[in-house]
Image (cartoon, rainbow, N blue to C red):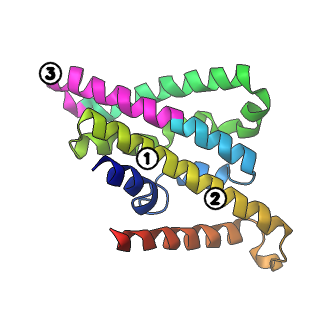
Amino acid sequence: MYLSLFFGSIFVANIVFSQFLGICPYIGVSKRFSTALGMGAAVTFVMFLASTTTFIIYHGVLVPLGIEYLITIVFILVIAALVQLVETAMKKLSPPLYSALGIYLPLITTNCAILGVAILCIQKDFSFMQMMVYALGNALGFTLAIVLFSAIREKLELANVPKALKGVPIAFIVAGLLSMAFMGFSGLS
């Protein structure tokens, strides 16, 4: 069960390709492989930690106090705090990556993929272990999507692409084709 949940969240129900969450950093940070890998690692860390923390807060605080309606506000605050932690650590440990990610690093706070996974874990009524597997699978699925897309975009810079399609237009075409390719995995389940 855990293996199917893990691989299903990476390939079949990929957060970017089948649920279309996290598109802003997916498009914005995928021009270079190194920045895409850095963003994928940051999102993986924040998504896993945020899902774990929000799960505990939801079941340990919100439900007992009967204030489940505050789920979105509380989850966003937790994610924002975790992003600040990642941003500070990255600034100290990897200044080139920190500057390369630029504005997209603080935007992880509003990355709907992170909030979406945290809320989906609650909506799907996962156990703690299922939530951890699902969050990690989605985080790795996001990383796979952005790294794969960045590698293709780097190759496209060297390709003979018609002038009208250079840059963002060809990126959107490739993103659509990748999405359709990953949707093909849903037929395997």
Q: Is residue 55 above or below residue 100?
A: above
Q: Report the span colored magenta.
A: 45-69
Residue at numbered disc 2: 148
Q: Quadrant of the C terminus?
A: bottom left
- The amino acid marked with disc number 2 is Leu
Mark 1 Cα-neighbour bin, 10 Å: few <14, some 14–19, many ≥20? many
Residue 53 in picture, x, y percent from top left: 36, 26
Task: Say which residue appears at 50% left-offset and 33% top-offset.
Answer: 46
Nearer to us in this view, 107 or 121 = 121
Task: Report, in whole angstroms, how far the alpha carbon at label 2 lies from the one at label 3.
Answer: 43 Å
Element assignment for label 2: helix
Residue 40 position, x and y percent, is: 60, 43
Question: Residue 11 vs residue 168: left or right?
Answer: left
- Lateral position of residue 52 relative to residue 152, left or right: left
Q: Which residue is mark 1?
A: 137
Near-viewer residue (1 or 150): 1
**Would you name the residue on which mark 3 appears?**
64
